[in-house]
Amino acid sequence: QLDRRIKTIVSQRNELETVLASMLEGVVAIDNEERIININAAAAGFFDCKPEECRGRNLQEVIRNSALQHFVRKSISNKVPKEDDISLYHNGEKTLHLQSSPLLDANKVSIGTLVVFNDVTHLRRLENMRRDFVANVSHEIKTPLTAIKGFVETLRLGDVDKPEEIERFLGIIQKHVDRLSSIVEDLLSLSRIEQEDEGKTIKLEEGYVKDVFQSAIQICHSKAEEKKININLICEEQLVSCFDSSLLEQAVVNLLDNAIKYSEPNSTIHLKGNLKDAEVKIIVEDRGIGIAKKHQPRLFERFYRVDKARSRNLGGTGLGLAIVKHIAQAHGGNVTVESTLGAGSVFTIHLPK
């Protein structure tokens, strides 16, 4: 009987260890003296330590994070469930969501606290992006609306009696209405691409990449002509890939449009297509103003602008690169950027062969 009971206890302990080891969430049991009773592999991984080396040691020795230590101390003293977020700076910044509950023995006496960790870095980043998006879209729409309202009120009150002044005011109103229309159109376009991507309704057909390039150059020709910018096309006639021609054309047009806006007059933009490492690369290279390193990770976010005043003056909606990113993803690829401030930028759409 004793042997059977021991085997049962060992089996139950092994089952518990297996469950803890298999959890994606980090779990740490800490006694009232702030010593670690148990820690699973996920929690140990967050703090770059080994579970067997942590058990029985003081929390401060093993995990040098003042926010966590303060959280555990309050959890033990208050003996009530708690929640909080802490930041970790080991192997890049992470945000961990902590949940604690009192650790009770068989007699319901508190012997410490149990802390569960969840890595919410990606979730918090998405929340911040959503907040930024709401703030930015509100600002982008409110600015032209305020201008329209002001000019309409001035005209309505009859404060302007010269025909040329009235014409000028109406021209300004028209410009802001066009800007609003562009923003709404780009938002709808972005929404449609995302929905089609999620529903896998985008029809990819094999075609020649050069045909898309020539069509995109034709669309951007007048803007390039205004600044006397030459678009140099480098692409093999027989380069083929599977794509939605209208979407891919839109992505290339957006990249060319940006390159034209931020390039000096009388300069050259290179539009290249090549096959390398089993992927088709579509490259737009300019010698424009370039982009600082700190801005590059956020370039493809909706409404993110490096230079807010300049990009608005140039007529951008702040959605062009976000559309390029989602078109690339809808094709099973991605988009990257390499840029040096003052030396130009290289945007590359990577499509699977």
Image (cartoon, rainbow, N blue to C red):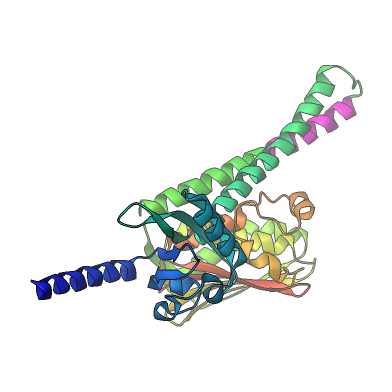
| Closer to the camera in the image, 175 or 124 | 124
Say whether residue 172 is magenta. yes
Whether residue 248 is visible:
no
Magenta-colored segment: predominant secondary structure = helix
Most distant residue in the top direction: 157
Q: Quadrant of the N terminus?
A: bottom left
Give x and y (percent) for residue 320: 61, 55
| Closer to the camera in the image, 179 or 79 | 79
- Please identify the quarter of the rendering in which residue 30 is found: bottom left
- At 39% from the left and 73% from the top, the residue drawn is 41
Most distant residue in the left direction: 1
| Closer to the camera in the image, 213 or 300 | 300
- At 70% from the left and 41% from the top, the residue drawn is 139
Say whether residue 64 is magenta. no
Q: Quadrant of the C terminus?
A: bottom left
Give x and y (percent) for residue 202: 38, 55
The magenta span reads: 163-178
Whether residue 66 is visible:
yes
- At 66% from the left and 45% from the top, the residue drawn is 136
- At 59% from the left and 40% from the top, the residue drawn is 184
Most distant residue in the right direction: 162
Image: 139 above or below 66: above
Image: 323 above or below 140: below
Total numbered labels: 0
Give x and y (percent) for residue 163: 88, 25
Give x and y (percent) for residue 9: 19, 70
